[in-house]
Image (cartoon, rainbow, N blue to C red):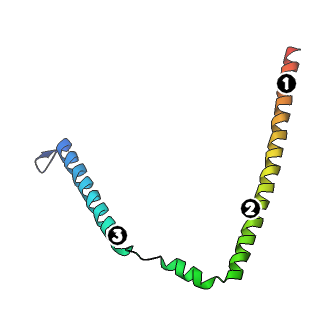
Amino acid sequence: MDYLMGIDAASFETFAQGLLLLATALATVVGIIIGKRKSNGKTPDSLEVAGALVSDKQGKDIVAALDNNTAAVTRQTDVITQSAEKVHDTIIDLRMDIARLGRG
């Protein structure tokens, strides 16, 4: 279909791309304006709710749990690193053994 309503395909494609670009720009501008209206100096409600629901003791318990989790993940990372180093060394040894067998 070379012509659509008397317009060749290349011109129609260029027109459609321009129209899409214009619609995207308009949607972006509207989104920015609406976003600014909603966030004028207000703190998010979720922070207010979280602050009201968590007492000081519960907050300290959460921090302690996160610290324990961090320590456990660090230990696990150390174990994985040591295991990876052992596997790496074993692979190097195997490569050397295979090279020796190939020589003869």
Q: SS for tag 3?
A: helix
Q: Amino acid at mark 2?
A: Thr
Mark 1 vs 2, N-terminal side: 2
Mark 3 vs 2, N-terminal side: 3
Mark 2 lies on residue: 70
Does residue 44 appear left or right of residue 102 in this picture? left
Does residue 6 appear left or right of residue 17 in this picture? left
Q: Quadrant of residue 20?
A: bottom left
Single out the mark in the foreground, 1 or 2.
2
The quadrant of the rendering that contains the C terminus is top right
Q: Residue at x 71, y 76 (%)?
A: 60
CA gap, disc 3 and disc 1: 65 Å
Where 65 falls versus 2 (above or below)?
below
Does the residue at mark 1 contact the one at mark 2 (Cβ under 8 Å)? Answer: no
Q: Residue 96, which numbered label?
A: 1
The image shows residue 97 at horizontal and vertical percentages of: 87, 25
CA gap, disc 1 and disc 2: 39 Å
Q: Amino acid at mark 3?
A: Lys
The image shows residue 32 at horizontal and vertical percentages of: 33, 65
Near mark 3 (Cα within 10 A), the count class, few <14, some 14-19 or many ≥20, is: few
Q: Quadrant of residue 65?
A: bottom right
Q: SS for tag 1?
A: helix
Q: Amino acid at mark 1?
A: Met
Query: Which one is nearer the viewer's eye here, 81 or 90?
Result: 81
The image shows residue 25 at horizontal and vertical percentages of: 27, 57
Mark 3 lies on residue: 36
The quadrant of the rendering that contains the N terminus is top left
Q: SS for tag 2?
A: helix
CA gap, disc 3 and disc 2: 38 Å
Residue extending farthest left: 6
